[in-house]
Image (spheres, rainbow, N blue to C red):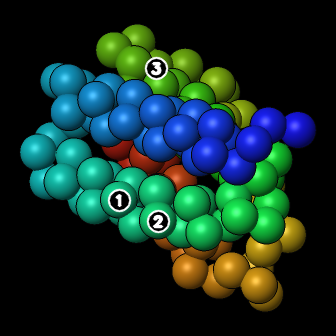
Amino acid sequence: MLPHNLESNMIRHTISEIEGRLRKAESIKEEHKAELLDLLSTLKSEIEQLSRTHSEQAQSIAGFTNVSTHEATRDEKNPQLVKLALDGLSASVAEFENSHPKLVEIVNRICLTLSNLGI
């Protein structure tokens, strides 16, 4: 198990990579970028809180968010891969529906927005 500071830094780095990918994505309309970046900012805060007590799950959520964003913003999208990535992201937060409802809501909104990016 990694020290909390290292895990937190890894999560922040992953979120920063996602932000960079979104900002550079030419296939996404500006309003969708703004919405996703806003949701990502909230997700970052929620994941950092979760990482204090559930570090492995927080890393999984960040990782699935990264993969989902990658698949949804590719120039040549594979709808099956996008669906698998989004299903993994949704599943990564399922156990937190009662204890972290805002986290689940944010992830669900991210999934919906990514799935609606023209696929």
Label 2 sits on residue: 45
Q: Identify the secondary structure beneath mark 3.
A: loop
Label 3 sits on residue: 77
Label 1 sits on residue: 41
Looking at numbered disc 3 in the image, what kind of residue is underneath it?
Lys
Q: Say if residue 18 shows up in the picture.
A: no
Tell which circle, 2 or 3, labels the residue nearer the N-terminal end.
2
Give the foreground label among 1 and 3: 1
57 or 80: nearer the viewer: 57
- Specify few, some or many for label 3: CA neighbours under 10 Å numbering under 14, 14-19, or 20 or more: some
Figure check: 92 above or below 75: below
The answer to which quarter of the image holds residue 75 is: top left
On-image quarter of the C terminus: top left
The answer to which quarter of the image holds residue 113 is: bottom left
2 or 38: nearer the viewer: 2
Q: Identify the secondary structure beneath mark 2.
A: helix
Tell which circle, 1 or 3, labels the residue nearer the N-terminal end.
1
Please state the horizontal and vertical placement of residue 62, each as a whole percent of the image. 60, 44
Q: Say if residue 30 shows up in the picture.
A: yes
Please state the horizontal and vertical placement of residue 27, each as a whole percent of the image. 22, 27
On-image quarter of the N terminus: top right
Q: Identify the secondary structure beneath mark 1.
A: helix
Please state the horizontal and vertical placement of residue 20, each as a whole percent of the image. 28, 29
- Residue at 51% over, 25% down: 71
